[in-house]
């Protein structure tokens, strides 16, 4: 498919027709790779939520495990 590079503010760009964009499966974020004579648009790498999920899990465990009478008793004996 041929298209034209157009002015977009202080930049230049192209319009990607909806059917082509749908077929590509690209999401909201993409990565641009440049080589001489070509520009490639590929899906952006997915960032892991491992740390976020771990922190949330820890917060949930702490919230459920925070108020234990036997721990209060143990701490009181150390004071």
Image (cartoon, rainbow, N blue to C red):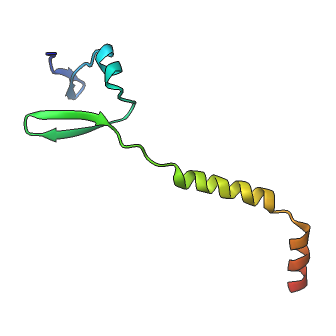
- Residue at x-position 77% and y-position 57%: 63
**Is residue 19 shown left or right of residue 33?**
right
Q: Quadrant of the C terminus?
A: bottom right
x and y, in percent, of residue 23 in the image: 32, 20
Q: In this view, does 35 lie above or below 53?
A: above
x and y, in percent, of residue 47 in the image: 43, 47
x and y, in percent, of residue 64 in the image: 79, 56
**Is residue 72 shown left or right of residue 62?**
right
Q: Residue furthest left?
A: 37
Q: In this view, does 69 lie above or below 24?
A: below
Q: Quadrant of residue 70?
A: bottom right
Q: Is residue 4 above or below residue 41?
A: above
x and y, in percent, of residue 20 in the image: 29, 18
Q: In which quarter of the image is residue 66?
A: bottom right
Q: In which quarter of the image is the N terminus?
A: top left
Total residue callouts: 0
Q: Residue furthest bottom?
A: 78
- Residue at x-position 39% and y-position 30%: 27
- Residue at x-position 16% and y-position 16%: 3
- Residue at x-position 64% and y-position 52%: 56
From this viewpoint, is residue 79 visible? no
**Is residue 77 shown left or right of residue 30?**
right
From this viewpoint, is residue 40 visible? yes
Q: In which quarter of the image is residue 65?
A: bottom right
**Is residue 72 shown left or right of residue 17?**
right
């Amino acid at each position: 498919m041929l298209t034209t590079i157009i002015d977009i503010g202080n930049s230049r760009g192209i319009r990607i027709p909806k059917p082509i964009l749908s077929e590509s499966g690209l999401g909201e974020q993409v990565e641009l790779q440049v080589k001489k004579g070509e520009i490639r648009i590929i899906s952006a790498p997915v960032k892991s939520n491992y740390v976020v999920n771990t922190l949330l899990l820890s917060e949930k465990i702490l919230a459920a495990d925070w108020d234990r009478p036997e721990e209060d008793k143990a701490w009181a004996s150390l004071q």
